[in-house]
Image (cartoon, rainbow, N blue to C red):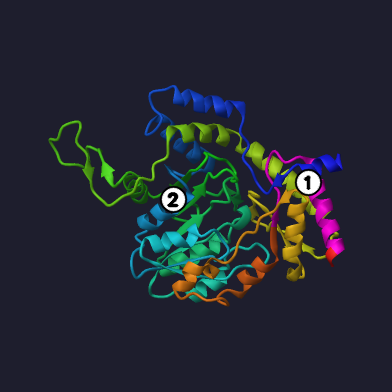
Amino acid sequence: MANETKRKVIPYGRQSISQEDIKAVVNVLRSDWITQGPRIQEFEKALCRYTGAKYAVAVANGTAGLHLACLAAGVGPGDEVITSPMTFLASANCVLYCGGTPVFADIQPDTGNIDPEEIAKKISARTKAVIPVHFAGHPCDLKEIRRMARKHKLVVIEDACHALGAEYQGKKIGACQYSDMTVFSFHPVKSITTGEGGAVLTNNKRMYEKLVLLRNHGMTRDKAKIKKGQGDWYCEMQALGFNYRITDIQCALGIGQLSRLDRFLAKRRQLVQVYQKALADTSHIQRPVELPGGRSAWHIYPVFIHPSSLKPVVFKKLKAAGIRPQVHYMPVYWHPYYYSLGYRKGLCPGAEEFYRAEITVPLYPSLKLREVHYVVRTLKDILEEVR
């Protein structure tokens, strides 16, 4: 069995698609509406029911959601937005799209989440918003971030692209209990998938209406908001918006996926418990944590190799054994484009050390227990060999 397992490539993440999902997509393909139809609102309402938010705006992807959220927050040229460097590029790029300046605050070493104390150091007269990122699905310290935001009149946009299904202080991430907007991603390796896709959730009606307008080219047919006495065909472009629409095809998939989200999360948490127990006595490995007050969605399972100088060879040997690990993430400001903007290494030492040590190993609902044990055994054997 071991040899058979070695021949199978085990990715770090992957989607789980059922026959019901396929049937739902086929039904939409056979219907009159494959985009801008009823499945979109149905999906948005399902997201609201699940999270407890008042409004949801489904969009083309998580990046589009972050961009629209920044626009709804009023971010523009001259504004600064504080975010984490330990994230995918979109968390900072969305600020650049608006003409603003990303400001990076260092992270907490145990969770990889942005540190509220570091946020406080970076607030200036130009700060417009904060984008905390729930790294790996573990909620940030939103209560403290919200306290600072209110003091300085800042907008809080949760980047919850890792965290659909996570909980904070007894409520689902997405409820916007301590934020103005929450952004999700439905990429194939996330909690649920629509292929590509995302959503922005909010309890603020004004922000919701702006998000809806900007999602569709800035156009509206709302009779209450357009010139009186026009024909039924009439629409107005009232802002410079974007084509960030999602399709009914994608939302049909999302509706079915969302109905199984709790099962997906239960399986992820079961597999995490296996990893945590199996790696508890392994030298040279630091395991991820789950802090009181938060319940992680476990989008990924990151481990930390000590000394970090062993990471490159461990990564290479895992791949040779048929395991496809990943790294989450190189600090955003290390990328050449950000270097060209004047950012330099040394800006967030904690994030840089985190990156040097982190490797993401496989975790997804269809991952088999025997595959988890194979990953653990292989990782231990590699560390025994290289240390």
370 within the magenta span: yes
Asked if labels 1 and 2 touch by Cβ distance under 8 angstroms, the answer is no
Is 187 on the left or on the right of 360, as rendered?
A: left
| Residue at 80% from the left image edge and 45% from the top image edge | 6
Q: Is residue 225 visible?
A: no
Check disc 2 and give the amino acid type. Gly
Q: Is residue 9 visible?
A: yes
Q: Height in image: 360 above or below 7?
A: below
Image x and y of residue 322, in percent: 75, 48
Q: Height in image: 172 above or below 290?
A: above
| Residue at 49% from the left image edge and 74% from the top image edge | 343
- Which numbered marker is on residue 65? 2
SS class of the residue under badge 2?
A: helix
Few, some or many residues within 10 Å of mark 1 (<14, 14–19, 20+): many
Check disc 1 and give the amino acid type. Val
Image x and y of residue 208, in percent: 37, 47
Find the residue positioned furthest to the left. 229
Q: Which residues are magenta?
A: 360-385
Name the image quarter holding residue 386. Answer: bottom right
Is 285 on the left or on the right of 126, as rendered?
A: right
